[in-house]
Image: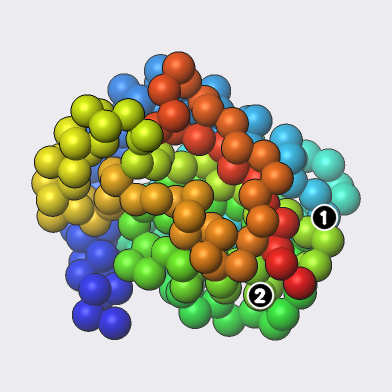
Amino acid sequence: MAETKEVLHRYNRYSHVYDLFESIMEWLVFKKWRGKVFSKVEGRCLEVGFGTGKNFSYYPKDESVSMVAIDLSPGMAAKSKKRATGVDVDLILMDAQHLAFKDNVFDSVVMTFVLCSIPDPVKGVEECVRVCKPDGKIINLEHIRTKNRLIAFMQDLMNPITYGLFGFNVNRNTRGNIEKGGATIVEDRNMTFTDIFRLLVSKPNK
């Protein structure tokens, strides 16, 4: 609980400069990947951690898809309002570790760069599995601890800085956390020539 409050404090504090901090990576690669992520969603879809709303413009226009999005930080949500204009989505303030939805209600659950910041990522995945239908899918775009020992060492050195300043971790075993959370990975794609940025699609174990 205390760790969740600390993460909330950090994201509220940096919400006004968060887009600036990510602007180079967003322009170079992130924006190219978001469309690929949302091309996979179907039916009723939950986005966990909408942040400043960078994914909104990539939401499917297909009327068969309906979007619900949650985020922990009021500061980040406030920054998303302009991007939410004209987008058909229900925006809700909510903790990803304690989703206030019934079981088995979403066909798709999406997270982009979220499991790096949730204090208990396994609990976050468990909640996604719980609200996802048995035949649904969970889609993650994440940065993950690499298998390259030298780069992994650098990630470990950087992690206290990124976590202390911005509340996210660069060295988590996210694939392992997804599996521990009760999902089976059916797609694991490297988004660059390294294995740091990955697109993972999983199915709930139900």
Indicate the quadrant containing the C terminus: top left, top right, bottom left or bottom right.
bottom right
Sooner in the amino-acid sequence: mark 1 or mark 2: 1
Q: Which residue appears at 49% of the width and 79% of the height?
A: 98
Q: Is residue 76 left or right of residue 38?
A: left
Percent x, y of residue 155: 22, 38
Secondary structure of residue under mark 2: helix
Q: Residue at x 58, y 81 (%)?
A: 100
The residue nearer to you, when weighing 4 against 187, is: 187
Residue 60 has which mark?
Answer: none
Q: What residue type is labelled 1?
A: Gly
Q: How many labels does the image show?
A: 2
Q: Which numbered circle lies on residue 43?
A: 1
Foreground of the two, 161 or 194: 194
Q: Residue at x 31, y 22 (%)?
A: 24
Provide residue 48's location: percent of width, then percent of height: 53, 59
- The residue beneath circle 2 is 130
Q: Can residue 117 be seen in this view?
A: yes
Q: Closest to the observer: 84 or 121?
A: 121
Q: Is residue 151 above or below residue 112?
A: above
Residue 20 in view here: no
Q: Label 2 is placed on what type of residue? A: Arg
Q: State which quarter of the image contains the N terminus.
A: bottom left
In the depicted structure, whether residue 192 falls above or below residue 76: above
The picture quadrant where one finds residue 135 is: bottom right
- Name the residue located 56 percent from the left edge and 59 percent from the top edge: 179
